[in-house]
Image (spheres, rainbow, N blue to C red):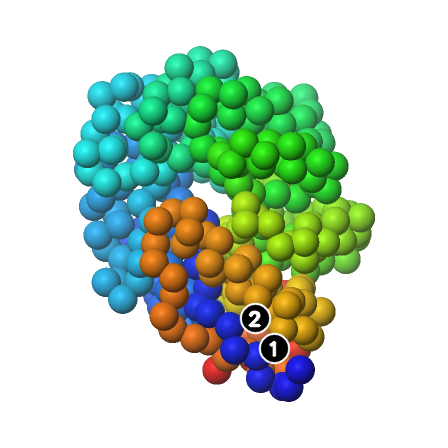
Amino acid sequence: MGSEVFVEMLANPHCHLREGEAMEPLIKLAIKGGADLLGPMPNTALGLTTARQVKEYCGLVSPSIQVLPIAMMNEATTYDMLRDWTAAGIKDCKIYPLNRTTRSHNGVAHYGSLLHRVKYCGKLGIKVHLHPEHPCMLIDNRDAEYQFWPIADMFLNEGATIVWEHGTDARCIPLWKQMARTGRFFVTLTAHHLATTETLSFGDVRAACKPTIKTLIDQLGLISLIEEGHSWVVAGLDDAPHPTNAKHVHEDCCACGAYTAPFGLQLYAYALGRMLETKEGIVKFVDFTSRNARRLHGFRPCSRKAILVRKPFRIPNAYEVGSWLVEPFWAGRDIGWTLL
């Protein structure tokens, strides 16, 4: 293939736009990274749990961007709230495990208590997104995703559509394939989990994230899954910005989140570079990074093209985000793709 590869704009159904003065610059940086569809996560400081909160928050996003509104479900969510979501056009909700990840203080400890509400989501056509780490803190981070799958399977059996977000553990792949046979199961994969391993990223606070980056075997397994071309495997950056002083700390632990939005499409190209060497591979790359998410969430196919060029791109050391200075994943490193 030539040095230029024509693809489509990135659909990113898993982004973090934060709040206040940080929102506008984060949206601009997401556009810079090739995205034209964003799904803002509802784990704001207070949590976006009501239809009004979600609509007001999404209303702050530039009209040049397509927005996927997502509400937060927890043990306080009522049936009336579910009906309100539907009436407001909100067809997606997210469940977080209590205190297992960033801003999950509104999360869930007892998933069994949500069974009937998840079943009602299925009847209303609300897709249920999961942060798939087991809520029991006795389970190590390394195994928390793998041990979560019975919970996801339990929810799937209630008839809802399940979105397993930011998959990282290759041990789950056979289980994902089994659940995908229902036609109601989808998994999103981030660029940073595809680009590196826990050994290569050890000690790098910019790569510290939840779920944690896994082994080379996991990385290669996830890449192979994408190369198989499944319609239920979807890109989702989980681009989580934090100010520098939250990453470089003198006490306690650093904030978890890898910020990749300003070069998201390029990082996917870096991680999946061999797919861009053939016409068939390019089609699968476009499906993964654009079409699968749009099809899943009822958006029209992208009419805008993006051009990836085989040319070194140095990731900036930091980005100014309002009053924040945000150091991205792989700050200062070169990747072999530039976005025109």
Give SS at disc 2.
Answer: helix
Which mark is first along the chain, 1 or 2? 2
The percent coordinates of residue 302 (x first, y second) are 38, 65
Residue that label 2 marks: 266
Label 1 packing within 10 angstroms: few (<14), some (14-19), many (20+): many
Are the residues flagged by discs 2 and 1 in contact, CB closer than 8 Å? yes
The percent coordinates of residue 135 (x first, y second) are 57, 24
Which residue shows up at 62% across the image and 22% down it?
150
Q: How many marks?
A: 2
Q: Is residue 16 visible?
A: no
* Among the 4 quarters of the image, the one containing residue 164: top right
Residue that label 1 marks: 337
The front one of 298 and 13 is 298
The percent coordinates of residue 54 (x first, y second) are 26, 41
Which residue shows up at 38% across the image and 73% down it?
304
Badge 2 amino acid: Gln
Which residue shows up at 43% across the image and 75% down it?
305
* Among the 4 quarters of the image, the one containing residue 248: bottom right
The front one of 273 and 63 is 273
Badge 1 amino acid: Trp
The percent coordinates of residue 287 (x first, y second) are 53, 60
